Image (cartoon, rainbow, N blue to C red):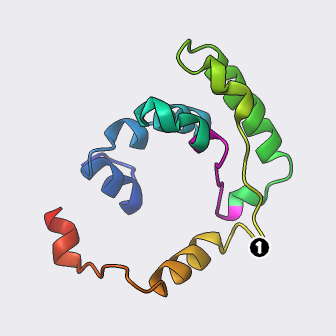
Amino acid sequence: DIPNKSEHEQLLIDEGCADIGACDSLVEAIVQCLENCPTDVRAAVIQNVLVVGGCASIRGLLPRLALECRAALSKIPAMATIADRIRFTPLDHTPVTAVWVGASILAHIDGGADISLSDYMEG
C-alpha cells in the first residue's frame, strides 16, 4: 500500500495502473493514459476526454488543461500528430453528478453482465 492515497487511488494501483495512480498532475495522467492506449485509438480517445467531479467546474480549468495537454503531447514524437485534436467533451449536466448519471445509465442497460464483488476481486 502507498501512504496518503485514497481508497480509489489504491484500487487503481492494485489493479495494475500504478503508473497512472502515481501521476502528479491531470496532464501527466492524461498523457500516460494515451501512451497506454493502442496507437490506432489514441485520436478517438483524445477527442473524447471527460473531466468530472466538483473541481471540473472551476472556471478556466478545461481551457488551461487543454493548453497544457497540447504542450505536453507536442513534446512526445509519437503523440505530436494528435496534440491539436484534444477536445474535452461538454456535459449536458453538472460535472459533479456526471459519474452518478453514467453509472445509472449503465445499470439500466439491458444485456449488461452483473458482476459480483467477489468476481471483481478475483479479476
Query: Which residue is at a point 60% across and 35% down the rendered structure image?
Result: 43
The percent position of residue 118, horizontal first and vertical second, equals 16, 76
Tag 1, which secondary structure? loop
User: What's under tag 1, amino acid-wise?
Assistant: His
For mark 1, what is the residue? 93
Q: Which residues are magenta?
A: 45-54
Q: Nearer the viewer, residue 72 or 49?
A: 49
Q: Nearer the viewer, residue 86 or 121?
A: 86
The percent position of residue 72, horizontal first and vertical second, equals 64, 22
Could you say which quadrant of the image residue 51 lies in?
bottom right
Query: Which residue is at a point 82% across and 41% down the rendered structure image?
Result: 63
Q: Is residue 34 above or below residue 111?
A: above
User: Could one spot residue 47 in this view of the protein?
Assistant: yes
Query: Which residue is at a point 72% across and 33% down the rendered structure image?
Result: 85
Query: Which residue is at a point 68% across and 70% down the rendered structure image?
Result: 96
Could you say which quadrant of the image residue 58 lies in?
bottom right
